[in-house]
Amino acid sequence: MTVVRDYEEILAVIEQYADGHKFGSDLMKKSFHRNAIINAEPIQTLYDAIDEAGVCQPVTRVDILDVTCSIACARVTIEKCYGKNYIDFLQLMKTDDGWKIVSKIYQEF
């Protein structure tokens, strides 16, 4: 059963992920599952890109959040991040350590 607390916890994980763009990959890593992927590549690809690019101050909003029991999908718009805009689709799973992002696919627009 999905409860309001699940939505709040997921939004906190997404906020932590977004704050990773502002404060670096060490913060961002806390929002991802250790076996997460990005566009079918290891998540380390994202961390390396963040570390190389440095921090930015994006405008972020959650457009869609769909939660069913212990899985969720979020569509997140990120604007003004390294001079570009992105749509992220984040898939999350409730684990023993709380909600974690298990995969990310994105598109620049």
Image (tube, rainbow, N blue to C red):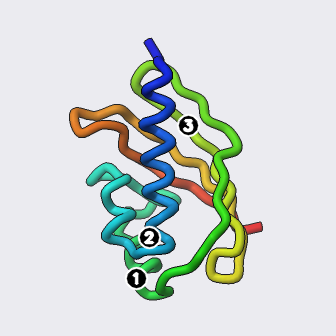
Secondary-structure class at tag 3: strand
Where is residue 48? Give x, y as percent.
Answer: 39, 79
In the image, is 104 to the left or to the right of 81? Answer: left
Residue 45's place in the image compared with 78, above or below, is below
Residue bearing the label numbered 2? 46
Residue 1's place in the image compared with 10, above or below, is above
Where is residue 71? Give x, y as percent.
Answer: 45, 29
Kindly report the distance in space between the C-alpha atoms of the residues bearing marks 1 and 3: 26 Å
Kindly report the distance in space between the C-alpha atoms of the residues bearing marks 2 and 3: 19 Å
Q: Earlier in the sequence, mark 2 or mark 1?
A: 2
Residue for point 66% across, 52% down: 61
Kindly report the distance in space between the C-alpha atoms of the residues bearing marks 2 and 1: 9 Å
Secondary-structure class at tag 1: helix
Which-is-in-front pick, marks 2 and 1?
A: 1
Residue for point 39% across, 35% down: 93
In the image, is 60 to the left or to the right of 15? Answer: right
Q: Residue furthest right?
A: 109
Do residues under tags 2 and 1 come within 8 Å of each other at their CB atoms?
A: no
Label 2 Cα neighbours within 10 Å, binned few <14 / some 14-19 / many ≥20: some
Residue for point 64% across, 59% down: 60
Where is residue 76? Give x, y as percent.
Answer: 64, 51
